[in-house]
């Protein structure tokens, strides 16, 4: 397993739509394992392949608490097929937008169709933190960031900040 470098805002890769996984094979399972290792190392509770520069519809999640056993989940070609009318608000952050958090309102419950790491079709209905995390990560696969769900003013401030940081990182490399 390999820890992969994370793609950070404002990299345009984060706005790219990910391609479906055609076949679940050892390469896809290895990528899932790499994503889990990268997510745990960061540390985070969710990671989409595009956040490591790989535009494939694959994401990993582990919403277990620190004092609980790890509970890694792999979602291949996930799609939200149903959302509740009821809403919930969570403070979200993102490994591609480090150290920035904002409250985001999303459906409280979602049903997601996906393929597991064995290539079997699955469906999960999630609520609470898992529902939020699934929506956040599936957004990544569609080129959407959690900051797209906050006010334009706040979003513009965050993008400016990270654009400035990226320029200073590039200057340091010269």
Image (cartoon, rainbow, N blue to C red):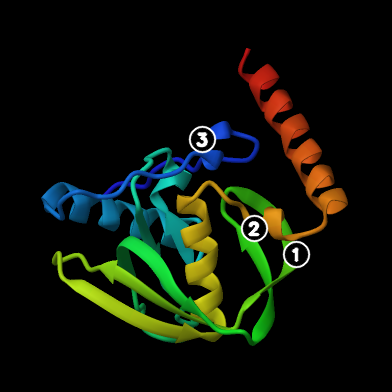
Residue assigned mark 3: 13
Coordinates of residue 42 in the picture (x, y in percent) = 50, 56
Q: Residue at x 35, y 78 (%)?
A: 71
> How many numbered callouts?
3
- Element assignment for label 2: helix
Mark pair 1, 2: CA separation: 8 Å
Which of the two discs, 3 and 1, labels the residue nearer the N terminus? Answer: 3
Coordinates of residue 43 in the picture (x, y in percent) = 51, 61
Choose between 142 and 155: the one closer to the eye: 142
Which of the two discs, 3 and 2, labels the residue nearer the N terminus? Answer: 3
- Taking 32 as reference, is 50 above or below it? above
Q: Are marks 1 and 2 in contact (CB under 8 Å)?
A: yes
Mark pair 3, 1: CA separation: 22 Å
Residue assigned mark 2: 146
Q: Residue at x 51, y 53 (%)?
A: 140
Left or right of residue 75: residue 137: right
């Amino acid at each position: 397993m390999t820890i992969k470098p994370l793609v950070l805002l404002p990299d345009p890769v984060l706005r790219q739509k990910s391609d479906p996984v055609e076949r679940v094979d050892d390469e896809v399972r290895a990528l899932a394992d790499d994503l889990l290792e990268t997510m745990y190392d960061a540390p985070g509770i969710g990671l989409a392949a595009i956040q490591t520069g790989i535009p494939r519809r694959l994401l990993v999640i582990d919403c277990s608490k620190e004092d609980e056993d790890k509970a890694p989940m792999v979602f291949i070609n996930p799609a939200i097929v149903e959302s509740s009318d009821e809403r919930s608000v969570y403070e979200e952050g993102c490994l591609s937008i480090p150290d920035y958090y904002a409250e985001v309102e999303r459906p409280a419950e979602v049903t997601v169709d996906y393929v597991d790491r064995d290539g079997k079709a699955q469906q999960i209905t999630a609520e609470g933190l898992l529902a939020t995390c699934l929506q956040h990560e599936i957004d990544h696969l569609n080129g959407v960031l959690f900051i797209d769900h906050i006010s334009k003013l706040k979003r513009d401030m965050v993008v400016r900040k990270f654009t400035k940081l990226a320029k200073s990182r590039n200057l340091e490399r010269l």
